[in-house]
Image (cartoon, helix red, strand yellow):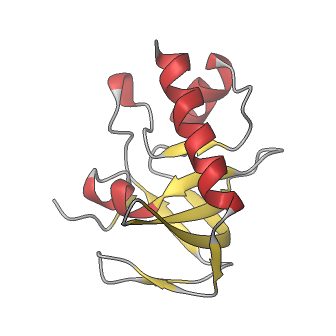
Amino acid sequence: MKKILLITIISAISCIAAHAQKLTEYKASNGITYHPGDTVKLGLGSGTNGQFVYIVPSMLNSSSTQIDWIKRRLSGGNVIIKKIKQDEIVGVKKTLFFVGAGAMYNLHLDIESAIESCEVKPCKK
């Protein structure tokens, strides 16, 4: 079930990214203006067992080992923004950060959802 949900999220993010507008900055709801090259401070994952829900691997064939690595490695850590993209789907704007965390692949960060769930610091709680 978790793999199906993750694949669905990643597929949706990939579709968004294909039609997205590239941004040079983004002012988030936590009051911070983010730019490519900036560091984003992470909190704890908001999912089951502390897994990140709004930070997912960009690779569609992500294994549970990779997801466990993300949980262990990123909790309380940092990621670097590589690209910022924004798109509107069915009237809802989504802003995605493509981030690097020292792995051989990038991660997708749904910044506003991550702020709401405190996966990114500072958050709204």
Q: Quadrant of residue 24?
A: bottom right
Which residue is the extreme one toward the top? 1
The answer to which of 114 and 4 lies nearer the viewer is: 4
The image position of residue 101, as x and y in percent, is 68, 52
> 87 and 97: which one is in front?
87
Number of numbered tags placed on the structure image: 0
What residue appears at the point 47 percent right and 63 percent down from the top-left corner?
41
Q: Quadrant of the C terminus?
A: bottom left
Residue that appears at 64% across and 50% down: 15
Q: Quadrant of residue 70?
A: top right
63 relative to 104 in the view: left or right = left
Q: How far from the left and from the top, in percent, is residue 111?
A: 44, 62
Residue sitting at the far front: 90
Which residue is at a point 71% across and 59% down the rendered structure image?
A: 18
Residue at figure coordinates x 62%, y 18% from the top left: 64
Depicted 47 relative to depicted 107: above or below: above
- Tell me if residue 39 comes above or below residue 103 in the rendering: below
Does residue 73 appear anywhere in the picture? no
Q: Is residue 56 visible?
A: yes
Q: Quadrant of residue 59?
A: top right
List the single residue furthest toward the left: 125
Q: Nearer the viewer, residue 4 or 112?
A: 4
Residue 60 at x, y percent in the picture = 72, 32
The x and y percentages for residue 2 are 47, 17
Which residue of the protein is positioned furthest toward the right in this rendering?
104
